[in-house]
Amino acid sequence: MRVLLAGSSGLIGTALAQSLERAGHDIVRLVRRPPRVPGEVYWNVEAGELNRAELGAVDAVVHLGGRNIAAGRWSTQTKGELRSSRVQSTALLVETIGEMAQRPRVFVCASAVGIYGDRGDETLGEESAIGSGFLAELGREWEATAARAATRVVHARFGVVLSREGGALAKMLWAFKLGLGGRLGNGQQYMSWIGLGDAVAVIQRAIDDEHVQGALNVVAPEPVQNAAFTRALGRALGRPTPFAVPALALRIALGQMADEALLASQRAVPKKLLDGGFPFADETIEAALARALG
């Protein structure tokens, strides 16, 4: 296949590109700087620039781009950048797909379990209602934009992707290695997660299997509460986890981002993947952490 990939420099995009190339597929990478090597195509989301002629025919389009949600306190400007990096870029890809003489077979566009909002202990499958809050509304608009693509569309609702190479796990490792790790707030909020290898395999399934479409929870079968994750990571590193970061302190430091990205509870399960017999390599948090840290 020939796959057009946006977000190829990120954690998931890097691993996906490597996996696809090992399987013999060609990758066309969208980049925001002048292309340096064959297979790179420049795009400027803010200006709506993407040279369709340079793309040629592609079999699949995968969009994994977007500014980091947990980069810090959400100002009005930050919220605008979070939105444009997702919705505006998706709109440009949807427009590009519509203008292709030969349409790709599938458009896999990233989304997130944050679309469900703060739902406590409720088990969330793909059929569950969209929640409330900034992240939920962002997810709603993001998916609505992607759904306009003139091809099969998969909304990949990612949980926390576990890897020591990047993402949330890499950011917290230093504190846990020093024995300073601890739960966030009361630690009762559910965290939906998935190992990096499984996340890549899910995207490949979404590309290959024409029966996969619409919302898809890209999470492992066993979401865990933050306190349980904290204990599991401490055990994996052989370090104590005696501390807790009070919710009030998080809110003072990070504002709305703390409530929606750190303290909100999403107990999302991969119902479609389980019904389709997807073979998870890491079904438990212990197995995923052992692989990520090994």
Image (cartoon, helix red, strand yellow):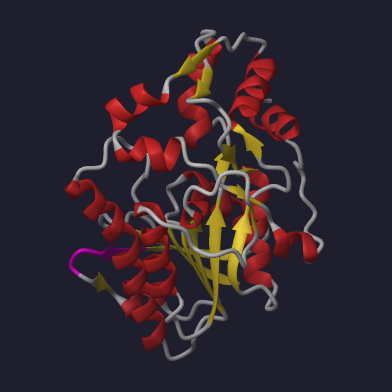
Residue occupying the point 42% across, 55% down: 7
Q: Nearer the viewer, residue 272 or 55?
A: 272
| Vertical comparison of 209 with 68: above or below | below
| Vertical comparison of 135 with 106: above or below | above
In the drawing, does residue 13 fall left or right of residue 6?
A: right
Q: Quadrant of the C terminus?
A: top right
Residue 88 x, y percent position in the rendering: 29, 67
Q: Is residue 290 visible?
A: yes
Q: Report if residue 197 lies within the magenta region.
A: no
Q: Quadrant of residue 163?
A: top right
Residue occupying the point 33% across, 49% down: 67
Q: Report if residue 44 lies within the magenta region.
A: yes
Residue 70 x, y percent position in the rendering: 37, 39
The residue at the far bottom in this view is 101
In the drawing, does residue 260 fall left or right of residue 164?
A: left
Q: Quadrant of the N terminus?
A: bottom right
Magenta stretch, residue numbers:
41-47
Q: Is residue 166 visible?
A: no
Q: Quadrant of residue 75?
A: top left
Q: Nearer the viewer, residue 67 or 74?
A: 74
Residue 91 x, y percent position in the rendering: 33, 73
| Vertical comparison of 179 with 263: above or below | above
| Vertical comparison of 120 with 182: above or below | below
In the drawing, does residue 195 fall left or right of residue 277?
A: left
Residue occupying the point 58% across, 31% down: 188
Residue 234 x, y percent position in the rendering: 63, 16
